[in-house]
Amino acid sequence: MDDPRTNYRIKDFEVSQRPRERLEKQGANALTHAELLAILLRVGKKGANAVQIGQRLLDIFGGLAGLHRATVVELCQVNGIGKAKAVQIKAAIELGRRISSLTPEDRPAISSPEDVADQVQYKMMGLEQEELWVLLLDSRNRLLKTEQLYRGSLNASSVRPAEVYKAGIRHNAAALIIAHNHPSGDPAPSPEDINLTRMLIEAGQLLELPILDHIVVGTNRVVSIKSLHPDLW
């Protein structure tokens, strides 16, 4: 059966299925290539919404690698793509290329809870639900990547260590830092937070991929579980 969205404009989608809203709620990694392109394109044309035009671009140029190689003139030859949209696509691709080419020296070093707060506090303290993020560090404690792993009530029974450590192994991290938020605004760790921390530390010892700290983010304040409970380490 055809996708029922193919005959509608994006504004006719259910709000929860619109690319921009999905990115805001679920993160960019939840979107398809075509949906990410649709956010750049913003609007489609008569008979084709922005997601469909994004998919058409991928089909014509052979995926993201082909879009990377395509010139502005070539992009403009696709029905529904004007010069402004073509330039936006090329600019976004170039930003991605520059990020991927950052040298280790460009990566922020994490040496304190305050450094962690600089990376996550602004975004996390505005979240309506609890989320657990993992910061992946290299052998010199420089930030490789931050991944959002869990949303909802967090405790030792709901968080799987395998999911937490899979991210670190995939990116060849040397160490991890866990961060999660308290929507109430009070960053004081709960007994569940302590149990979760203990479980993840023990798993990290088995995998020889240590957790350096677990940071709890509240309103305008963060708490380091390692500072409060050094005995866990």
Image (cartoon, rainbow, N blue to C red):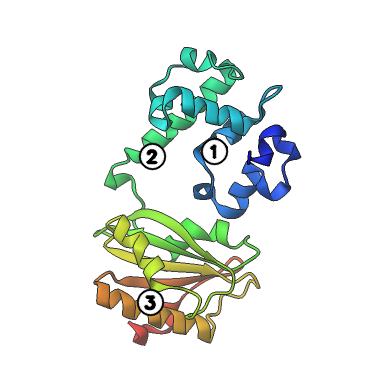
**Camera-side residue: 46 or 6?**
6
- The residue depicted at 54 percent of the width and 31 percent of the height is 55
Q: Residues within 10 Å of mark 2 (few under 14, many from 20)?
A: few
Q: What type is the residue that disc 3 sits on?
A: Leu
Q: Residues within 10 Å of mark 1 (few under 14, many from 20)?
A: some
Where's the C terminus, which quadrant?
bottom left
Q: In the rendering, at what x and y percent does residue 36 appear?
A: 54, 38
- The residue depicted at 36 percent of the width and 85 percent of the height is 232
Q: CA distance from mark 3 to mark 2?
A: 30 Å
Q: Is residue 67 above or below residue 144?
A: above
**Camera-side residue: 6 or 118?**
6
Q: CA distance from mark 3 to mark 1?
A: 34 Å
* Tally of numbered tags: 3
**Camera-side residue: 213 or 196?**
196
Horizontally, residue 219 falls left or right of residue 75, namely right
Which mark, residue 36? 1
Q: What type is the residue that disc 2 sits on?
A: Ile
- The residue depicted at 47 percent of the width and 80 percent of the height is 156
Q: What type is the residue that disc 1 sits on?
A: Leu
What kind of element bears circle 1?
Answer: helix
Residue 224, image quadrant: bottom left
Q: Earlier in the sequence, mark 3 or mark 2?
A: 2
Q: Earlier in the sequence, mark 3 or mark 1?
A: 1
Which mark, residue 200? 3
Where's the N terminus, which quadrant?
top right
Residue 122, image quadrant: bottom right
Marks 3 and 2 close (CB-CB < 8 Å) = no
- The residue depicted at 54 percent of the width and 33 percent of the height is 37
Q: CA distance from mark 2 to mark 1?
A: 17 Å
What kind of element bears circle 2?
Answer: helix
